[in-house]
Image: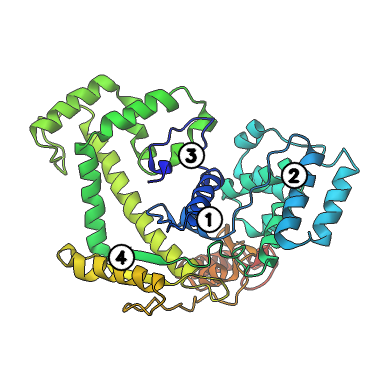
Amino acid sequence: MSPLIDELISNNEFPTNNPIFLNSNIHKQIDDLLSASKYPIVVGGTNYYIESLLWDILVSPPTSVTSSASSKMVKDSLKSRSGSSSPEMMQREDDRDGDSSTPSDEISDLELETMSPKELHDRLRQVDPISAGRLHPNNKRKILRALEVYQETGIPISEFIKEQRSQPGGNRLGGPLRYPHTILLWLRCNQEVLNERLDKRVDSMLHNGLLPEVRNFYETYVKSQSANQYTKGILQSIGFKEFVPYLEKFGADQDTIIDNFLQNIEYKLPKEPIASEPEGLDLLRKCLDELKLVTRRYSKKQIKWIQNRFLGSHDRQVPPLYSLDTSDVSQWMANVYSPAVDIIESYINERQPKTTPMESVQHPGSGLNEEVLNFCEICKRHFVGEFQWKLHLASNKHKRAKDGLRKRVKRLGGGTIGGRGDVDGSSAKK
């Protein structure tokens, strides 16, 4: 079994929240297994990590020792992948190599972390307007990544993405499939059943030592962190941040009192406060409820990810995806185990499996530009992609806001709606 399954420690020397770091290790292990004629089996992980493992979609330029050396390494790497770099990228690299003042206004990592999302987006617009036009101004994580790539290499991340997409098998989502003989098994179940399972999982986590675990993590890695580090990276992962209100207000002594109380009631936490419960338990209850809520919400997001990026991408190399229904665990052998074994054995023996792979679906936004940023002057909101933009313009919320603004303008004696003077007043592209 892969040692990457073992517990990973979060510190500055081990970036566990970095898919580039994890994938560089996983790819080596997969290659070693394939070389030994063994079948790698990847289990679990979010679809974001699974996708970055299977497809060449991550931008991972080397950390630069000097800017010119980094650019040369990037150039050589891109040449080896696609045969040659684009003329635009080659020219940009040559300009940078010959001009030590480009870019002369490099910003430190600490400064970047403390900048507001708007300031970061404005900075990105200066150095990489294409990427700025693709990213929502509040998407701080992706904006920071784009700026990081530029500062490491002097090359906009949009150029790397362009190179990925130009490879054989590349598409609008990135580069080609890394492993052509991949099979995907999707364990699915009814959403109500899944919600119940997720809630019970949180309850079992409490019984199995969740409170001392988050306390130890908080005391060891978080308590001493500065404010800007406290709200980024793995510290924002589901399963920790929900407990911060409790951890900040109460100490380990109160944890012990609460745990003793929970032991006496066999960890069957009442949904509502009771008179005999210790101080802090109600706040902990709220933290647990929040964890259940965000976990259920995240499960729906994962399903949409598969539907949109796996099944809804007609121009992408997508491995066969098989749906296995886990709703009724009493039918596990018939609905899950036996079909899964048959699918794997069928591919090994080059025969047709009994189960049919899922069909691709037509995404309602297919054919629309997904990389344009629109700003609604009426609602004061940004929208990435034409599909989301059209949905917003057709929404009741936008229509009510537009009608309300029209009435206010009329009461004030006329004028224009929006920033462009048009009737709709809501489609300023930025």
- Mark 2 nearby-residue class (10 Å; few <14, some 14–19, many ≥20): many
Mark 2 vs mark 3: which is more N-terminal?
Answer: 3
Q: Residues within 10 Å of mark 4 (few under 14, many from 20)?
A: some
Q: Is residue 123 above or below residue 327?
A: above
Question: Where on the picture, by quarter, is residue 165?
Answer: bottom right
Q: CA distance from mark 4 to mark 1?
A: 21 Å
Q: Position of residue 92 (x, y in %)?
A: 83, 52
Mark 1 or 2 closer to N-term? Answer: 1
Q: How far across and how far down the image is residue 145, in percent?
A: 62, 46
Q: Which residue is mark 2?
A: 153
According to the picture, the residue beneath numbered tag 4 turns out to be 188
Categorize mark 1 by other alpha carbons within 10 Å: few (<14), some (14-19), many (20+). some
Q: Specify the quadrant that holds the C terminus.
A: bottom right
* Real-space CA distance between mark 1 and mark 2, rounded to the nearest whole angstrom: 21 Å
Q: Quadrant of residue 80?
A: bottom right
Q: Which residue is depicted at the point 49% across and 30% down?
A: 11
CB under 8 Å between discs 2 and 4: no
Residue with the mark numbered 3: 16
